[in-house]
Amino acid sequence: MTRNWAGNITFNAARVHAPSSVERLREIVAGSRSVRALGSGHSFNTIADTRGDLVSVAALPRIVEVDEAAATVTVGGGLRFAQFTGAVHEAGLALHNLGSLPHISVAGACSTGTHGGGVGNGTLASAVRALELVTADGELLRLDRGDEDFAGAVVALGAAGIVTRMTLDLVPGYEIRQWAYEGLSHGQLRERFDDVLSAAYSVSLFTSWRTARIDQVWLKQRVGDGDPGPAPDNWLGAALADGPRHPVPGMDPATCTEQSGVPGPWHERLPHFRPEFTPSSGEELQSEYFVAREDGLAAFDALARIGERIAPVLQIGEIRAVAADSLWLSPVYGRDSVAFHFTWIPDTAAVTPVLDAIEEALAPFDVRPHWGKLFTMGPERVRGLYERYADFEALTAKLDPRGTFRNDLVDRYFPGGRG
């Protein structure tokens, strides 16, 4: 029996493999009628499930090749961010952003459109310059930015092939300092919604949806973006935290990256959690929904109106801005977005009707769900949210005519992708 990270998914695989070489991976894929890749297991639906062969990419070679002249890093698809960001930092370079968790695999995060925060920062996948895939016939395929199929193959939900390498764009290294504020009123947020989300390089609003206040605002500011000096004790009516905080009330903040304005390298501040600790709160479910940034405030108000439905089954919610990209299935394709994240109690039966209520409340805003988390909206509704949906189906039919990488979720949402 194989279970995912949060323990909420039991995989139905007939066989589980952990190849230690790309050559062995190619043999497994070529000899299988049905195969799915498993990265770090940080998914909350059945996106990685299969009744055939489940392949963990964690044992593949740990490639970390920093090209300082080209400002890129090439990494093995099974690597987690924490396993290579230190080497990038030592070379004086950086990724433009990181997700909340440094524990997730680069290929899995990019293939589902996972992101960090910041009005000017795209998804993690937006940094991908090239990728190498094992295709259904066991051959290797390299795609570079600008190639015809590239924009459809980066956020591909594992349906285009198994990623063995990714080359990511880098920027000059930088430092971040992080502060936490408590008690931002909904009134202040409504008056200054865009200003709040733009107040730092990366901004996170943590809310329980229980009161008319945001529980915590985390401001991650790049050192050098103007010298802010000491953080004010009061910011838009919110109080500076008197010590480190964890997003989930009652949880130990020692697991979180350093706060209180202490400068540190980008890879030690942009994530919310330290790689040496168990991430987030442990046993949980997660969902996330994306709306266009211009609809962010109206979407916030729609959720606040059903806060009494959300709060009883919620551990914590998070609101962030994400910049648009051009990747076909990215949840921020073609539009700057606001993302509403929910970390739920581990009770699927109790959470599911709340998801229905959230999706109904956000329906007027053409809301898109995170592909790797829980959602209930059906295929026809999802199809209408993506301009390149049919193009993605055509791409999977071309790259995987036998349906080797398909599973129940892919079949349900992309039935036209069968060759």
Image (cartoon, rainbow, N blue to C red):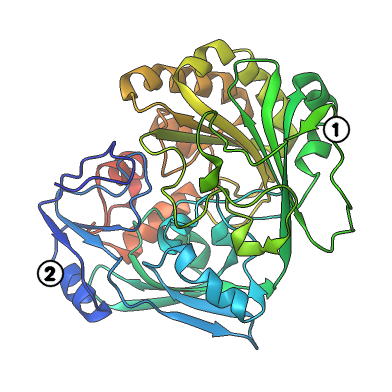
Q: Nearer the viewer, mark 1 or mark 2?
A: 1
Asked whether residue 131 appears in the rendered view, the answer is: yes
Q: Residues within 10 Å of mark 2 (few under 14, many from 20)?
A: some
Q: Is residue 270 above or below residue 244?
A: below
Q: Position of residue 410 (x, y in %)?
A: 32, 46
Q: Position of residue 192 (x, y in %)?
A: 84, 31
Left or right? Give the position of 371 relative to 403.
right
Type of residue at label 2?
A: Gly
User: Residue 40 lies in what quarter of the image?
Assistant: bottom left
Q: Position of residue 397 (x, y in %)?
A: 32, 58
Q: Residues within 10 Å of mark 1 (few under 14, many from 20)?
A: few
* 57 or 409: nearer the viewer: 57
Left or right? Give the position of 295 relative to 58.
right
Q: Position of residue 262 (x, y in %)?
A: 73, 55
How many marks can you see? 2
Q: Which residue is mark 1?
A: 234
Q: Identify the disc placed on residue 31.
A: 2
Left or right? Give the position of 184 relative to 354.
right
Secondary element at tag 2: loop
Question: Quick check: marks 1 and 2 in contact, CB under 8 Å?
Answer: no
